[in-house]
Amino acid sequence: MRSNTVSPGQSGTASQYNLLRDDAYGGSQLLTHQQGSPNMTLYVEPGVVYIGVTRVIFGGGNSPTFTAPISHPRIDILTIDNTGTLAITQGTEASSPVVPSYPANKAVLCEIYNRVGETSVKDSDDSTNGYIYNDVRPIIAPPYISSLSQVAAGLFINDPGSEAQGDILYYNGSAWVLLAPGSAGQVLKTQGASANPAWTSIGQRTLLQGTGAGNYTTTSNGAFVDVDATNLVATLTVINNQVLTIAYSLNFDGTGTPGTASWQLVETNSGVVVANGSTSSTTMQTAQGLIQFACKGTSAIFRLQFKTNSGSFTATVSNSSTAGQFNLPSILIYA
């Protein structure tokens, strides 16, 4: 405060009055009040206000003309936009009127209570005319921000909406989006630069085995067939480039005119042969292996298959080893 205290009985000087006026200047910024001769407009004092990131220097001026309600009182609001234009937003007439919703991209200066039959709008209630109901200038209240366009770029993250417990917020290259919770036990995995994170199952395994009763499929048609399409087909939900460790085992033998019996472990979604081999022997053969495979896409289907190269050579996948031990065809997948 620049002004000095004036004690009772003292006469104020011109300098003191000028300092008092300077001290009060801040409180007069965009102050709305009745006209010198009250009418259906209000006067707004000069002031500075920010509408979003736009600074508005207002030189003072009259509001638009208020209109009296027809049957019930009404509350209006007086606003200023980023061009310094004053405007009125009318409320709804009612026996107990409410303030209309504040518009976006404008600063609200005051709320005005209007009466049926009013002929002027005043600073205070005289029980007959309209009056300033609330002074809500943004310089005496927290600023109102309605959208990201009103703040500096990068200052806030836009709310993507529809959040649920367990959601994770991440940037997909163009916007902030939500990643919904994964399944219980999954962990979040990065897929490197320029790729989105994803849930994946770590430390889990999938074991598939044949039924263990008798021989399995016999083939002599020269085309690959599934060893056991019911029990030995693994369908997994994965993430792109997820690396799986796969163990496989099968026994097969051939009969008839010597030819070639071939087997393969194939991922049928991508058409990639994960492992394969062949033999021309008519004695029991065992194919076993442990490999790693990088999945492409979000799902993978693994199958054990085999075939012969001619109709005179028959191959059969069995459930016993050359030593008579029980040995089911199987696929074991570690994620």
Image (spheres, grey):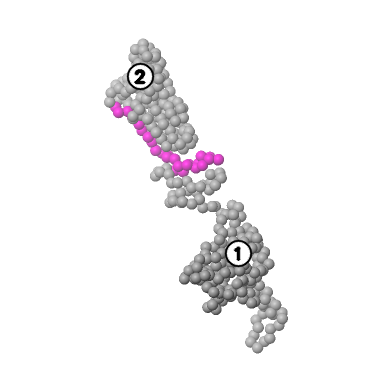
Residue 8 circle label:
none
Kindly identify the residue that appears in the image at 59 percent across and 61 percent down: 106
* Amino acid marked by disc 2: Thr
Q: Is residue 82 left or right of residue 189?
A: right
Q: Is residue 36 left or right of residue 259?
A: right
Q: Nearer the viewer, residue 240 or 122?
A: 122
Q: Nearer the viewer, residue 17 or 292?
A: 17
Which residue corresponds to mark 2? 219
Q: CA distance from mark 2 to mark 1?
A: 86 Å
Other residues around mark 1 within 10 Å, as few (<14) / some (14–19) / many (≥20): some
Mark nearer the N terminus (2 vs 1): 1
**Marks 2 and 1: which is nearer the front?**
1
Q: Nearer the viewer, residue 327 or 261?
A: 261
Q: Is residue 186 above or below residue 317?
A: below
x, y percent for residue 60: 67, 68
Secondary element under disc 1, as helix, strand or loop, is strand
* Amino acid marked by disc 1: Ala
Q: Is residue 187 left or right of residue 176?
A: left
Other residues around mark 2 within 10 Å, as few (<14) / some (14–19) / many (≥20): many
Magenta residue check for 170:
no
Q: How many marks?
A: 2
Q: Is residue 206 above or below residue 70?
A: above
Q: Residue furthest bottom?
A: 9
Quadrant where the N terminus sits is: bottom right
The magenta segment is: 187-212
Kindly identify the residue that appears in the image at 48 percent across and 36 percent down: 240
x, y percent for residue 152: 61, 55
Which residue corresponds to mark 1? 87
Kindly identify the residue that appears in the image at 44 percent across and 43 percent down: 187
